[in-house]
Amino acid sequence: MRIAVFDLGTNTFKLLVAERPEGASTGLRILHEEEVAVFLGRGGVERGMIADDAAERGLAVLRQLVDKAVRLGARRLHGFGTSALRSAHNGQAYTERIRKELGLEVVIIPGKEEAGLILDGVRQTVAFGAKPVLVMDIGGGSTEFILATDRALMWKHSFELGTTRLLERFPEINPMALDTQLRMGQHIDSQFELLWSVVDRHWPATLVGSAGSFDTIAHLVAIERGAPLGPDTSSFTFEVAEFDAVKDRLLALDHDHRTAMPGIPAHRTDTIIPAFMLVERVLLHGFSQVQWSRYSLKEGAASRFLGAVNT
């Protein structure tokens, strides 16, 4: 059976059309995937609402994505709303409008359920071992963390802190002065106190970043190595020192210079700055290695619907 998954994020809407490989009991055959910048949280996420102009942008993009999924033969369509819709007082009304106008049911999922779907996606591209690793998924409105081994999900949590929320609080990034870096870093640390206690108790050495902002981070590191990632690459491992080198160069650039930098999509020209800051604060807690996974929430959701999770 061919299905479509729609991930309605704070900054982007994503579509995945997939089916189970013929004759296989596990895995995904991805037929189409697409990401469109919507900025659903812009102008409203810190006020707990979806702004009118953002709602219209989202509906126009979603109409195109639904039409595409149907043309590609998807028999079942599943929509997921995350942080921006979770925290918006008009989030449910917006999903009801989507249902009435487009026929798409969008479920606003709790942060911990979002984290579980992310882990299901990541497990398909990253080999977990006996030692715990920390999975990190950066969104515009929230950041999810999962501590897991090959046998167990040990802990998961969704923090209402993402790139859009940070940009609205700290807009001075062109370039980012040291004082702003310090203030943003202190704010991140104060919001992640629960995470620090978990990390200090279990000491994971590897940070696994899934999709989204980590797509851009991984591509920038690979370009710096002189070996850009191919379109079929699903995972990539790099050292903390490589991350730091790219981060230091990026934070010194203004908007125009970031726009001209290979590897940064137009819709992440600004949000990539708080993304690097979020990752930096985590890596300061004893991590020695970073791994990127191309798969995340939408692949995890598709796997569950198709019964394709290899557990």
Image (cartoon, rainbow, N blue to C red):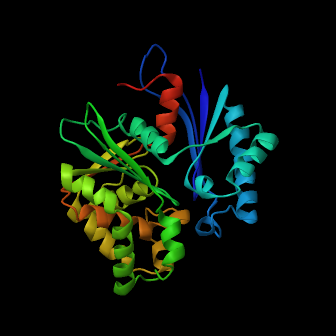
Residue 284 drawn at (x, y percent): 23, 65
Question: Quick one: which residue is furthest to the right in this view?
Answer: 101
Q: How many marks?
A: 0
Judge whether residue 74 can be spotted in this image. no
Q: Quadrant of residue 282?
A: bottom left
Tell me if residue 63 comes above or below residue 216 in the rendering.
Answer: above
- Classify the position of the C terminus by image quarter: top left
Q: Quadrant of the N terminus?
A: top right
- At 41% from the left and 44% from the top, the residue drawn is 294
Q: Nearer the viewer, residue 110 or 137?
A: 110
- Residue 215 sits above or below residue 25 on the image: below
Which quarter of the picture shows residue 33?
top right
**Where in the figure is residue 25, as x and y percent of width and height?**
43, 16
Please give left or right for residue 36 compared with residue 142 in the image.
right
Name the foreground residue: 155 vs 104. Answer: 155
Residue 6: % across, % down = 61, 41
- For residue 249, above or below residue 52: below
Does the rendering let one see residue 246?
A: yes
In the orientation shown, which residue stands out farthest toward the top? 23
Residue at left 55%, top 54%? 83
Q: Residue at x 28, y 33 (%)?
A: 152
